[in-house]
Amino acid sequence: MKKLTKYVSLIITLVLAMSVLSGCGSSKSDKKKLVMATNATFPPYEYVDGEKYAGIDVEIAEAIAKELDMELQIEDVEFGSIVSGVQSGKYDMGMAGMTITEDRKKSVSFSDTYAKGIQSIIVAENSSIKTADDLSSDIKIGVQQDTTGDIYATEDYGESAITRFKSGADAVQALKTGKVDCVIIDNEPAKAYVSKNAGLKILDTSYADEDYAICFSKDNEELLNKVNDALKKLKDDGTIDKIVAKYIK
Ligand code: GLN
């Protein structure tokens, strides 16, 4: 009997210890969530590394969430559904190497800018396309759907010149197999793709210069202001420079 009492008290102690431990674990999720929509096919800004999301935007978002005492939750969605999802309140913010454009500003508000982007042109090493001036409506241009590369190239060269892909990686694959003659995409992802795929190069001439920012619902000015304050602090204390330097050598 005495032995049994000893076992029972041991079990009770164990159960109590486990509930205290799991309670500690869940204290993290008591924090308010900051739901960020992104498209994790855009190295070095956002990509999947093993089981985790990694990249400049991911780390800046984590630093912002820490400043706001919130818990970051990342939703990996198609690039083209970020703005509408943020506008409808499905996500708190969109961060995806996203360029501020007048058209997007009709649907969402943008934070202060935190990085610059350049639309670059990737071609095969032996391509006859030497500069941006060689692009024309007769050339097959690959783009990632709904990006500024897609929007600007469609404006400049017409619908029939454009082949749209779900990701930059798919567009680069099509370039390698000769299905398109060039790919227009942001410079840092361009560098990342070219370094991983032999036989491709980036033209020296760029196609467009842009500013990246985080987008919010127009109804959520409070969060926008808080994020701008956090961004300012992270710029001033060197955190953003440090994160960028980790990914862009
Ligand atoms: N900067 C480009 C845009 O905003 C591409 C972004 C992306 O593909 N993630 O359209």
Image (tube, helix red, strand yellow):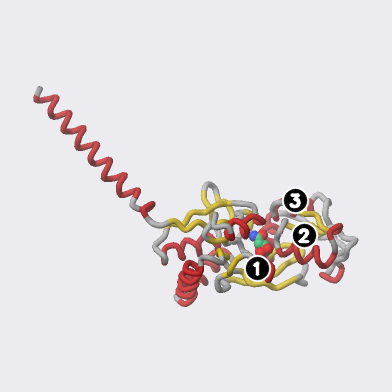
- Whole-percent x, y for residue 111 in the image: 55, 71
Name of the residue lying farthest toward the bottom: 236
Q: Which residue is mark 3?
A: 173
Q: Is residue 226 above or below residue 95?
A: below
State which quadrant residue 16 falls in.
top left
Task: Mark 1 vs mark 2: give the one in front.
Answer: 1
Q: Amino acid at mark 1?
A: Lys
Say whether marks 3 and 2 touch (CB < 8 Å).
no
Considering depth in this image, is 193 or 210 the residue closer to the camera? 210
Dot 3 crowding, Cα within 10 Å, few <14, some 14–19, many 20+:
some
Numbered marks: total: 3
Residue 88 picture location, percent across and down: 58, 57
Residue lying farthest to the right in this orientation: 138
N-term mark: 3 or 2:
3
Cα gap from disc 3 to disc 2, whole angstroms: 10 Å
Relative image position of residue 121 (x, y in whole percent): 77, 65
Query: Seen in the image, is 238 located left or right of residue 26?
Result: right
Measure the alpha-carbon separation of dots 1 and 3.
33 Å
Tag on residue 106?
Answer: 1
Residue shown at the point (52%, 47%) measured from the top left: 51
Q: Give the x, y percent position of residue 150.
A: 75, 61
Work out whether residue 163 or residue 46 is closer to the camera in this orientation and state it: 163
Q: Residues within 10 Å of mark 1 (few under 14, many from 20)?
A: few
Q: Tell me the kind of residue under disc 3.
A: Gln
Find disc 2 in the rendering and name its residue: 183
Q: Residue at x 47, y 61 (%)?
A: 62
* Residue at position x 72%, y 57% in the image: 144
Task: Tell whether circle 3 marks a residue whose Cβ is less than 8 angstroms from ligand 1.
Answer: no
